[in-house]
Image (cartoon, rainbow, N blue to C red):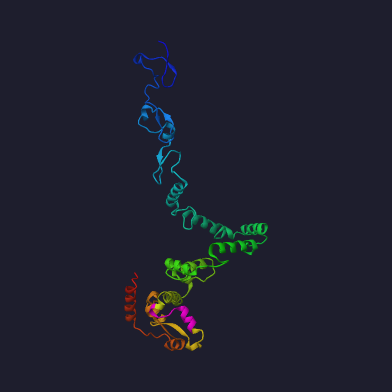
Amino acid sequence: MPTIKCKTCKKEFRPSKHYIDSLYCHHCRHLKPKTKCKNCGIEFHAIKKYKDSEYCSSCRKYHKNCEICGKEIFVQARTCSKECAYELKKASWLKSCGTTHNFSKNSISRKNWEGRLKTEEGIDNVFQREEVKEKSKKSHLEKLGVENPSQSKIIKEQKAKTGLRNFGVKAGFVDIEKCKKTWFKKYGVKYPSQCIEVKKRIRQKNEELGIWFPLSKLPELELYRYNVGIITRENINRYGEKYLLTNAKELYQKNKNLKFKEKLSVDHKFSVIEGFKNKISPEIIGSIINLEIMTISENSKKHKRCSVTRQKLINDYKNFLNENKIN
């Protein structure tokens, strides 16, 4: 039987007895008419297995949805963009390291690394290594002519320019009131150093570095006094104006021109010693309802005596919690 040229692929073929009148070879006979790929726009013949496919073989190979946003993609990747790829990384790090970055402060890998530094070299970070310190000094001397960047005139000028550009001043905070509002929103105080949690973190770090004497080694009464002192100052700063009609700053100003015995001081109505003996929580002894303003002379005469009973103190504290909706 003579050969015929295929109408689709233009190749010559010899028709079989079953397809004697066919104008297409056995490859093209089963193909649908050419369709346009929905993704790349190239025309293609859909084979029988993928007869309903809207995509060519190249696009179909990697066709999937982004694992983060669900967008259709046609590349050998799991996500559609750098942003989605980073989100996928964060999800993976959260499973493996417990945080959204594999080397963030509280991640497992970071803690393991810090542990190895501590046990093997006795340091907390690599910048405590002598060779790193020397290399840093050498690098600064070569680039800036000084051992510390903050000593360089170039760096000082750059800082001044940045301060003027961003804040309108050469150095320091330009809008301290805005900072106070942010700190109050975040910590409930005007300055972070007034927050009990921040103070605890500062103490913990200084104890670890051996700068401060550990509280765990102080006698129980001294520890009790210390905790009462922190809570007392916190309460004066937060509730002083409402309950005592003054605050620490105003007390300081009033005491400037007074004699020692006439200076005003903060007294605990139920004394700290009696609070310790009766095992009353430092939160109650240091709370604003247990504080009063009196002269140093009066406070000295009162000594460790109490001006309120234990029961009244407890009742006043409960009323204070309810009034300020404190859990």
Give the quadrant of residue 33.
top left
Q: Is residue 243 magenta?
A: yes
Image spot of residue 318 (x, y percent): 32, 75
In the rendered image, the vertical position of residue 110 relative to residue 26, given as above or below: below
The foreground one among 36 and 181 is 36
State the quadrant of the C terminus: bottom left
Question: Which portion, as a residue range, is magenta?
Answer: 242-254
In the rendered image, the vertical position of residue 302 relative to residue 141, given as above or below: below
State the quadrant of the N terminus: top left
Q: Residue at x 53, y 64 (%)?
A: 167
Image spot of residue 315 (x, y percent): 31, 78
Give the quadrant of residue 122.
bottom right
Q: Residue at x 56, y 62 (%)?
A: 165
> Of all residues shown, which one is farthest toward the top?
1
The tally of labels here is 0
Q: Residue at x 58, y 59 (%)?
A: 127
In the rendered image, the vertical position of residue 248 relative to residue 191, given as above or below: below
The foreground one among 215 and 237 is 237
* Residue 152 visible: no
The foreground one among 196 and 236 is 236
* Residue 87 visible: yes
Image spot of residue 205 (x, y percent): 50, 66
Q: Is residue 284 magenta?
A: no
Left or right position of 125 against 194: right
Image spot of residue 179 (x, y percent): 48, 67
- Which secondary structure type mostly characterizes the magenta part of the structure? helix
